[in-house]
Amino acid sequence: MKSREIKFKSKNHNYSVIIGKNTLNVLPQKIKLLCPRANKIALIIDKKVPNKFKNFFKTKLKSYKLLILNFDANEKNKSIKFVNYYVDKLLFNNFNRTDLIIGIGGGITGDVAGFVASIFKRGIDYFNIPTTLLAQVDSSIGGKTGVNSKQGKNLIGSFHQPKLVISDTSFINSLPKKEMICGFAEILKHSIIKDKKFFNWLERNSESILSKKNKELAYAIKKSCEIKIYFVTRDENEKGLRMILNFGHTFAHAIEVKNNYSKKITHGEAVLTGMIMATRLSIIKKNCKIQVLKRIIDLYKKNNLDYTLKNISNAKWIKSLIPFLKQDKKNDDEKINFLLLKEIGKTCLPNKFKISTSQLEKYCKTISLY
């Protein structure tokens, strides 16, 4: 199948996102075109990436001085400790600003590699090669980089756009079902916040995506990237409009931190939970009709995703999230900043619904009833 290329164009940045099977083959020529002065390349690569891909990079990039930095990608290792380690390795190997860092892995690897690139000598060129569906449709687009702290998720970071993104769907063939669900959660979110027609298409084709049918999968990745690019290019540093991309994430991040980033619940599963909670809150605040909630839940049930909703009828469990909701980085005062839904394809404006913890405590029981 022919690869698809999307252009990211903003006031200060311009790069391509290349999507399709075997698109990795363009990597050597793209390096020569975009980084002609590079002599050294550091690969920050997830240990879980299959060896055949690692061998591919070694063969295709043999004309460069390669530094291979393996990364055990998980939320606990997404930390300043590992960033410092990689920066020290780059300094020891005399990397300079004309060289290149390539992040190869899921969103955690991309966030860490991108953050290293953003701070190393005040900025070094960076390619992102996302290997999970979640990273291909979400974190690889937009230039957000960063690491976690004990106080919360992604609280230390920067904006640093890549020079190129290559989303090779060949990586996805090796992904387990749980990872596919992670990516599908973000695809679904993109349709809910921006594109009703895309949501209608997902109602018909979600099973094909989750079963890795290449044609539907590539289309879903492309549509998701286009929606994310729409928001990012209009608000690159997340001052307003881009916050719409956080639909469901206020609750989701709280769930992840509460569970100490346990592998028992993935980011995508937390987002699936968070989107339903945010939709319920939207109904309580009289912005959204209950029929919208029903339609979203029907899609969950059709794809056996409703297991992610097991706790949301428990008011006590919802209340237990409040201390973690208070730490969300979108908050700019003592209240919790929620992004609410109007209908499928349209959200409320960001920063419109700030709810105090005392108000939210009163809402917990009502949220659990819908």
Image (cartoon, rainbow, N blue to C red):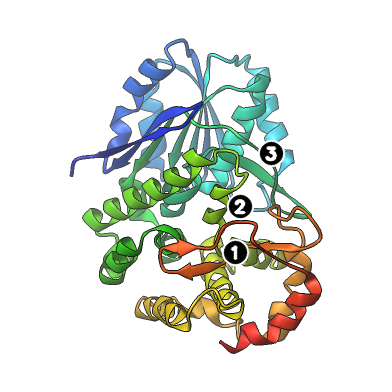
Q: Is residue 192 above or below residue 102?
A: below
According to the image, label 3 marks what residue?
82
Secondary structure beneath dot 1 equals loop
C-alpha distance separating marks 1 and 3: 20 Å
* Res 211 visible: no
Who's the residue at 56% across and 58% down the image? 349
Amino acid type shown at disc 3: Phe
* Mark 1 surroundings: few (<14), some (14-19) or many (≥20) residues within 10 A: few
According to the image, label 2 marks what residue?
74
Q: Going by the image, does 184 lie left or right of 358?
A: left
C-alpha distance separating marks 2 and 3: 11 Å
Residue 331, quarter of picture? bottom right
Contact flag, marks 1 and 2 (Cβ < 8 Å): yes
Amino acid type shown at disc 1: Lys
Please name whichever residue, 75 or 92, is drawn nearer the observer in this view of the structure. Answer: 75
Which quadrant holds the N terminus? top left
Q: Is residue 161 above or below residue 174?
A: above
Q: Position of residue 341 (x, y in %)?
A: 52, 68
Q: Going by the image, does 340 lie left or right of 319?
A: left
Q: Earlier in the sequence, mark 1 or mark 3?
A: 3
Who's the residue at 29% across and 56% down the image? 217
Secondary structure beneath dot 2 equals loop
C-alpha distance separating marks 1 and 2: 9 Å
According to the image, label 1 marks what residue?
263
Please name whichever residue, 96 or 297, is drawn nearer the observer in this view of the structure. Answer: 297
Furthest-bottom residue in view?
369
Residue 328, quarter of picture? bottom right
